[in-house]
Image (spheres, helix red, strand yellow):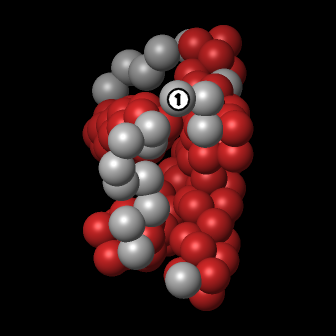
Amino acid sequence: MLWIKALHIVFVVSWFAGLFYLPRIFVNLAMVAPGSGAERARLLLMARKLYRFMTVLAVPALAFGLVLWLGYGIGRGPGNGWLHAKLAVVLALLAYHAACGCLLARFERGEPARGHVWFRWFNELPVLGLLAAVILVTVKPF
């Protein structure tokens, strides 16, 4: 079980690296001056590759988490409400991941995006998710 837990943590950390960095690329895309085609194309290429890579990393993170929950019974039984809360956080992070994909598609289509300040705030959301998940798993408050 400890190997599964270790791999789960490694893939979660790797997935989060993408969740933290992709919106920073969006900040830069939102700041690209009109007519800067090469800069825009380079940032879009980086964003596409990162989104693909972080999606690949999310799959084993989720799979190992499911193995811990369903295979080893972590979080089952009374007094494990923390796991339900953590699963809600994971679902919210998956929605954030999907939202990043939608935002990337809008940038690729050249549709008007939000301003760089909005993307700076959007970039902070996974920090809150990480904080909540770590506290829930470590402290197990309920």
| Mark 1 neighbour density, 10 Å: few (under 14) some (14–19) many (20 or more) | few
Residue at image location 66% in from the left, 61% down from the top: 13
Residue 94 drawn above or below residue 118: below
Q: Quadrant of residue 12?
A: bottom right
Residue at image location 53% in from the left, 54% down from the top: 47
Residue at image location 61% in from the left, 46% down from the top: 137
Q: Quadrant of residue 71?
A: bottom left
Of the pair 11 and 73, the residue shown nearer to us: 73
Q: Which residue is mark 1?
A: 142
Residue 35 drawn above or below residue 119: below
**Residue 101 visible here:** no
In this image, 22 relative to 107: left or right? right
- Where does the image place residue 35, in percent across and percent down from the top left? 57, 33
- Where does the image place residue 125, in percent across and percent down from the top left? 58, 26
Of the pair 80 and 48, the residue shown nearer to us: 80
Q: Label 1, secondary structure: give it.
A: loop
- Where does the image place residue 48, in percent across and percent down from the top left? 46, 59
Of the pair 70 and 12, the residue shown nearer to us: 70
In this image, 123 relative to 59: left or right? right
In this image, 30 relative to 106: left or right? right
Q: Residue furthest bottom?
A: 3
Q: Residue furthest front?
A: 78
**Residue 95 visible here:** yes
Residue 1 drawn above or below residue 81: below
Disc 1 residue type (three-letter): Phe
Q: Quadrant of residue 26?
A: top right
Residue at image location 54% in from the left, 83% down from the top: 1
